């Protein structure tokens, strides 16, 4: 993702990048129900919650195998500082908006 995509609408643009890449490659999202986004993390889906969890586990095992293979090559990977900052501050900064604590506090506030 570009710096502009990350700064403007990170979560929305992450989804758009996934959709665009699937379309560009002609990939059927029902046939490939998970993706590992570079410098971000995993996304998985399915027709039921159980199937989405299963697909997430398959992706996790596949990613672990790939991770170990990369360790053998010793290639250096670099995550730009602006992306590291985005991941950290969206969960921990003064304007945090993403994560378990925010979801929990919003849910709690709605029930009061």
Image: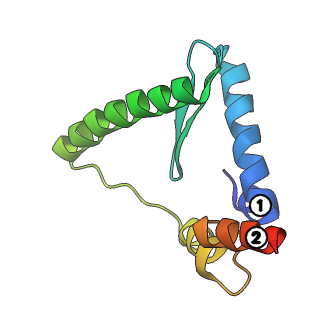
Which SS class for mark 2? helix
Q: How many marks?
A: 2
Residue at the spot of label 2: 106
Image location of residue 96, percent across then percent down:
69, 77
**Split into 4 quadrants, where in the image is the C terminus?**
bottom right
Name the residue at 67% across, 13% down: 26
Name the residue at 59% across, 30% down: 49
Q: Residue reaching furthest bottom?
A: 94
| Nearest to N terminus: mark 2 or mark 1 | 1
Left or right, 105 with respect to 58, comes to right
Q: CA distance from mark 2 to mark 1?
A: 28 Å
Which SS class for mark 1? helix
- In this rendering, the answer to whether 76 lies above or below 100 is above
Crowding at dot 2, Cα within 10 Å, few <14 / some 14-19 / many 20+, comes out as few
Crowding at dot 1, Cα within 10 Å, few <14 / some 14-19 / many 20+, comes out as few
Q: Residue reaching furthest left?
A: 72
Residue at the spot of label 1: 4
Image location of residue 69, percent across then percent down:
22, 36
Left or right, 68 with respect to 52, comes to left
Nearest the eye: 9 or 75: 9
Q: How is the image coloured?
A: rainbow
Nearest the eye: 109 or 2: 109
Name the residue at 66% across, 68% down: 104
Image location of residue 14, percent across then percent down:
70, 47
Quarter-of-image position of residue 82: bottom right
Quarter-of-image position of residue 32: top right
Image location of residue 75, percent across then percent down:
28, 49
Left or right, 2 with respect to 70, comes to right
Nearest the eye: 110 or 52: 110
- In this rendering, the answer to whether 86 lies above or below 35 is below
Q: Nearer the viewer, mark 2 or mark 1?
A: 2
């Amino acid at each position: 993702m570009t710096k502009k995509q990350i700064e403007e609408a990170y979560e929305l643009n992450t989804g758009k990048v996934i959709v665009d890449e699937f379309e560009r490659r002609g990939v059927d999202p029902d046939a490939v129900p998970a993706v590992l986004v570079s410098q971000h993390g995993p996304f998985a889906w399915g027709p039921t919650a159980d199937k989405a969890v299963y697909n997430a586990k398959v992706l996790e095992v596949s990613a672990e195998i790939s991770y170990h293979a990369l360790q053998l090559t010793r290639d250096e990977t670099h995550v730009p500082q602006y992306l590291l900052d985005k991941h950290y501050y969206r969960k921990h900064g003064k304007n945090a908006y993403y994560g378990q604590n925010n979801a929990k506090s919003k849910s709690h506030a709605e029930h009061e």
